[in-house]
């Protein structure tokens, strides 16, 4: 295994504060994504919204089922109505002070011109839209974790790059000190080498801080308690720290970028996903609005309801006895005039359906444009990566040659410092290219059609 492969290999080790021997646990990119999906409050909320929408649709469908209930009534009259059949006859009471009725009752809306059916269909489409929005939220979270993970990988590589140049600066400073003591170098050269080493040390601390911030952003997405991130280091740097660099408070390794790239590169060969969750959500929203408009229009049509009731009633009119009363009835209704309310409500839902369809078209165009742009950007980055890799090798050789020339008296130390800086910049740019390529691959994978089993 080569030096670069060893540098990037294996796992993210999330350990407690301390040295390399401190407690740690392995965490790969897949584990980061899994942890984020399992602990995300946003996904919990999206699941609850979806469940509520499904329950509402089921409730609407249940309204078409006959309803059976047990009804009971009781009342007490202070004055019972009475009348006299003739002036000379005694008064006849039309009931009793105590009145009650109880028994089962069945109701059934047998016809409503399709209002309930279309309303249930609209609510089902709303539930499907909420489910698609939940899937879209999961994709967004997955993309966010991947991007944060790649940013942490890039920040770690910057630490490695600065650490390499810091070791070089420290070694050159010590070499120049010995040469000064031997009278082969000037005090100015030693001061310049010392200043460069201090500058590299400051850059190293800055790179550590950036790495800590990137890791904290990743832990925030995975909802995991962050360790002590004051001085994080990649494992290879922690095992061979530059002189006088304090021990790491957190040591880790990231996944091999080559392996990650192999896993994601297939996305660049897949077509655009026209059934992406957010596109499906917009489509279902348009269907729901159209069904709602149809339901409102159907509400203007006739409706028929049936009623059946069996009860025990007291009193039986003027006769103070319990009687078995059986009732069967039907109610028909047809709205003739309502001031145009239904027409306006239907027009509102039609307009919402038109707006949802337009949003679907716009979202699809935007996503397809971003997907195509990412593919073009990936092709450009791939070509740039090969050139950048060769440039890093050249910059390393130039730095070595310039320092050899300085020791031979053919170059000034300013040229040495400039060569070291150029080498560092080339290393950092190479790391940025790796992160950018992985990011573009993840973005393409997000909007590409799923793999066919």
Image (spheres, rainbow, N blue to C red):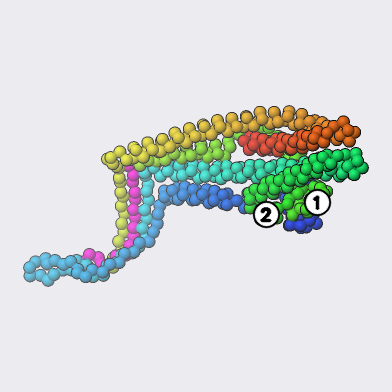
Q: How many numbered marks, from 0 up?
A: 2
Q: Position of residue 146 (x, y in %)?
A: 67, 43
- Quadrant containing the C terminus in the rendered view: top right
* Vertical placement of residue 148 versus 410, above or below: below
The N terminus is located in which quarter? Answer: top right
Asked if residue 274 lies in the magenta stretch, the reply is no
Main SS of the magenta segment?
A: strand
User: Is 395 placed above or below 57 here?
Assistant: above
Q: Position of residue 413 (x, y in %)?
A: 82, 36
Q: Give the secondary structure at mark 1.
A: loop
Q: Residue at x 16, y 67 (%)?
A: 82
Indicate the quadrant where residue 355 lies. top left
Pick the front one: 33 or 291: 33
- Name the residue tied to disc 2: 226
Q: Which residue is mark 1?
A: 244
Whole-angstrom CA distance, mark 1 to mark 2, is 26 Å
Please say whether residue 304 is one of the residues in the magenta stretch.
Answer: yes
Pointer 1 local density, CA inside 10 Å: few below 14, some 14–19, many at least 20? few
Residue located 31% across and 50% down the image: 330
Callout 2 secondary element: loop
| In-front residue for pair 102/389 | 389
Which residue lies at the image location 78% right of the left edge and 43% below the top edge? 195
**x 54%, y 48%: residue:** 46
Read off the magenta span: 302-318
């Amino acid at each position: 295994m080569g030096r670069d492969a060893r540098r990037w290999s294996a796992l993210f080790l999330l350990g407690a504060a301390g040295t390399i021997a401190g407690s740690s646990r392995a965490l790969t990119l897949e584990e980061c994504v899994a942890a984020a999906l399992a602990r995300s409050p946003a996904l919990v909320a999206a699941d609850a919204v979806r469940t509520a929408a499904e329950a509402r649709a089921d409730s609407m469908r249940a309204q078409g089922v006959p309803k059976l209930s047990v009804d009971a009534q009781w009342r007490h009259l202070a004055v019972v109505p009475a009348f006299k059949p003739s002036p000379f006859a005694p008064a006849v009471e039309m009931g009793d002070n105590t009145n009650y009725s109880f028994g089962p009752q069945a109701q059934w809306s047998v016809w409503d011109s399709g209002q309930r059916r279309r309303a249930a269909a609209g609510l089902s489409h709303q539930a499907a839209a909420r489910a698609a929005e939940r899937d879209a939220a999961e994709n967004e979270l997955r993309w966010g974790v991947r991007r944060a993970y790649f940013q942490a990988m890039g920040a770690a590589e910057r630490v490695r790059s600065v650490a390499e140049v810091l070791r070089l600066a420290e070694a050159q400073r010590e070499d120049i000190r010995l040469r000064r003591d031997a009278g082969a170098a000037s005090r100015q050269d030693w001061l310049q080498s010392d200043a460069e080493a201090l500058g590299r040390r400051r850059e190293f601390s800055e790179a550590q801080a950036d790495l800590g911030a990137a890791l904290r952003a990743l832990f925030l997405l995975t909802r995991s308690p962050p360790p002590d991130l004051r001085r994080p280091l990649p494992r290879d740097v922690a095992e061979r720290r530059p002189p006088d660099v304090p021990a790491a408070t957190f040591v880790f390794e990231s996944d091999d970028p080559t392996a990650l790239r192999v896993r994601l590169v297939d996305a660049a060969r897949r077509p655009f996903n026209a059934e992406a969750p957010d596109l499906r959500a917009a489509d279902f929203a348009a269907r729901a609005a159209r069904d709602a408009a149809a339901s409102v229009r159907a509400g203007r049509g006739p409706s028929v309801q049936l009623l059946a009731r069996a009860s025990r009633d007291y009193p039986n009119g003027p006769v103070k006895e319990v009687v078995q009363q059986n009732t069967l009835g039907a109610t028909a209704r047809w709205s003739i005039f309502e001031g145009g309310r239904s027409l306006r409500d239907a027009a509102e839902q039609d307009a919402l359906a038109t707006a949802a369809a337009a949003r679907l078209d716009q979202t699809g165009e935007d996503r397809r444009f971003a997907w195509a742009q990412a593919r073009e950007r990936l092709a450009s980055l791939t070509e740039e990566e090969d050139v950048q890799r060769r440039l890093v090798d050249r910059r390393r050789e130039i730095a070595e040659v310039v320092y050899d020339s300085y020791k031979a008296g053919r170059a000034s130390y300013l040229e040495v410092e400039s060569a070291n800086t150029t080498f560092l910049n080339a290393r950092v740019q190479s790391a940025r290219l790796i992160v950018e390529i992985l990011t573009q691959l993840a973005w393409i994978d997000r909007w590409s059609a799923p793999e066919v089993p």
